[in-house]
């Protein structure tokens, strides 16, 4: 038994985004290299935290079995995808390494802000995360806009921040910061006025 993409583009991807979809295929043949149909293949995923059975599929007339797998909720890291022929213990499982990468950003986390004294700078730590909570370290094209609804908050000038003014709806101008996150993170400094 071996992984076999049958010259089909996109089969057996070695990298997959968390939450992404991959199609994997193995082929089973006998000692004369003839395809073996109707064999039950057990697919499992092994990581540092343990082993997870994903599905059982069956080989077709060409001896091929496929797994359609969505990496929903998977943490970034290295995994081993195993395909086992349980009925014949002497056949070694087919294994391949899959690297799970961060998925698309779905949320922006702002770290807790400790109490600050008016007039002093404080930090805003921002992190873009995917649906599984992985920091989106593989993207540097993420921008967010931040502002406070009350006047008196000022963002410090930084290379990754564009500042502007916007009306807060009460005929008051407040600062608006457009922030570019690098590798999914940014740190801003803000000052709250004493007034």
Image (cartoon, rainbow, N blue to C red):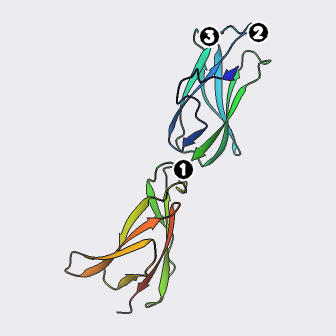
Residue 3 horizontal/vertical position (percent):
65, 25
Element carrying mark 1: loop
Of labels 1 and 3, earlier in sequence is 3
Q: Quadrant of the C terminus?
A: bottom left
Q: Looking at the image, is mark 3 or mark 2 earlier in the sequence?
A: 2
Query: Circle 3 is placed at which residue position?
Result: 38
Residue under circle 1? 102
Quadrant of image for the N terminus: top right
**Residue topped by disc 2:** 31
For label 1, count other residues whose C-alpha is less than 10 Å away and answer few (under 14), some (14-19) or many (20+).
many
Describe residue 42's horizontal placement relative to residue 20 as left or right.
Answer: right
Q: Is residue 107 left or right of residue 96?
A: left
Above-or-below relation of 195 to 42: below
Instruction: Tell me which numbered mark, 1 or 2, is placed earlier along the sequence.
Output: 2
Q: Are marks 3 and 2 in contact (CB under 8 Å)?
A: no
Q: 147 or 97: nearer the eye?
A: 97
Neighbours of disc 3 within 10 Å: few (<14), some (14-19), many (20+): some
- Res. 116 in view: no
Q: Real-space Cα distance between discs 1 and 3?
A: 36 Å
Between 159 and 184, which is closer to the camera in this rendering?
159
Residue drawn at the location 39% of the way across and 92% of the way down? 194
Occupied quadrant, residue 160: bottom left
Q: Residue 20: x, y in percent?
A: 50, 40
User: Which mark is in front, 3 or 2?
Assistant: 2
Where residue 161 sits in the image (x, y, percent)?
A: 42, 73
Occupied quadrant, residue 81: top right
- Vertical order, 131 against 112 (above or below): above
C-alpha gap between disc 3 and disc 2: 17 Å
């Amino acid at each position: 038994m071996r992984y076999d993409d049958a010259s089909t583009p996109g089969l057996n991807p070695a990298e997959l985004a968390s939450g992404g979809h991959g199609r994997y295929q193995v082929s089973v043949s006998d000692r004369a290299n003839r395809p073996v149909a109707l064999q039950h293949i057990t697919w499992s995923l092994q990581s540092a935290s343990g082993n997870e059975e994903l599905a059982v599929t069956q080989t077709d007339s060409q001896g091929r079995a496929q797994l359609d797998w969505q990496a929903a909720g998977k943490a970034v890291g290295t995994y081993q995808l195993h395909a086992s022929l349980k009925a014949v213990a002497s056949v070694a499982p087919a294994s391949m390494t899959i690297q799970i990468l961060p998925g698309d950003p779905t949320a922006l986390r702002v770290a807790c802000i400790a109490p600050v004294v008016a007039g002093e700078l404080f930090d805003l730590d921002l992190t873009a995360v995917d649906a599984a909570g992985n920091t989106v370290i593989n993207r540097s094209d993420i921008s967010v806009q931040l502002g406070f609804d009350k006047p008196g908050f000022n963002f410090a000038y930084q290379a990754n921040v564009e500042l502007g003014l916007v009306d807060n709806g009460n005929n008051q101008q407040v600062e608006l910061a457009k922030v570019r996150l690098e590798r999914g993170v940014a740190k801003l400094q803000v000052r709250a006025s004493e007034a």
